[in-house]
Amino acid sequence: MVSALTQVAMFVRIADWVGVGAYLAMTYIVFAAAGAGWFARRRAALAGALSVVLGVTLYACLTYFGPAGIGTPAVDLVLGILRLVIAYWTFILSGAVAGALGGAIRRRVLGAAA
């Protein structure tokens, strides 16, 4: 949950993702997903992917339920959120890989029993 909330800060500033800023934002999202994988203990890849999905969903809710969504029917709001989550599939995939790496590092550092 905390990982998703930190990612919302990057998604809100998506207009600033130009040049090196895009690499830094993507690195920020990947580190947040790796942290989710670290703390997941099991199913680390799923935790990393879900942290990105939740972050994108929170960003979409901020966008569509804010001033941009005034007067929009509820069905369009829900479909807009789903469209945005589907559009960010590359971020979700990289979050899954980063989560798996975070889980692998945890097992390597703390051992299989931890």
Image: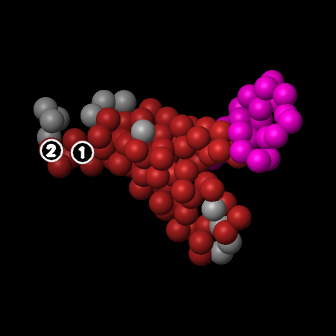
Count of numbered circles on the image: 2
| Quadrant of the drawing holding the N terminus | top left
- Whole-percent x, y for residue 77 in the image: 77, 32
Q: Which mark is residue 106?
A: 1
Specify start and end residues of the magenta stretch as a single range.
64-90
Three-letter amino acid code of the residue under disc 1: Arg
User: Which residue: 48% across, 47% down?
Assistant: 5
Which quadrant holds residue 83? top right
Report whether 46 appears left or right of 104.
Answer: right
- Whole-percent x, y for residue 74 in the image: 79, 26
Three-letter amino acid code of the residue under disc 2: Leu
Classed neighbour count for the residue bearing mark 1: other residues with Cα under 10 Å, few (<14), some (14–19), many (≥20): many
Q: Which one is in front, 61 or 22? A: 61
Q: Which one is in front, 83 or 6? A: 6
Q: Are marks 1 and 2 in contact (CB under 8 Å)?
A: yes
The relative height of residue 37 versus residue 11 in the rendered view (above or below) is: above
Q: Which mark is residue 114?
A: none
Q: Residue furthest top?
A: 75
Task: Write down the residue under mark 2.
Answer: 110
- Whole-percent x, y for residue 92 in the image: 57, 42
For mark 1, give the secondary structure: helix
* The stretch drawn in magenta includes residue 34: no
Q: Is residue 87 visible?
A: no
Classed neighbour count for the residue bearing mark 2: other residues with Cα under 10 Å, few (<14), some (14–19), many (≥20): few
The relative height of residue 94 versus residue 57 in the rendered view (above or below) is: below
For mark 2, give the secondary structure: helix
Which quadrant holds residue 81? top right
User: Which residue: 42% across, 35% down?
Assistant: 47
* The stretch drawn in magenta includes residue 65: yes
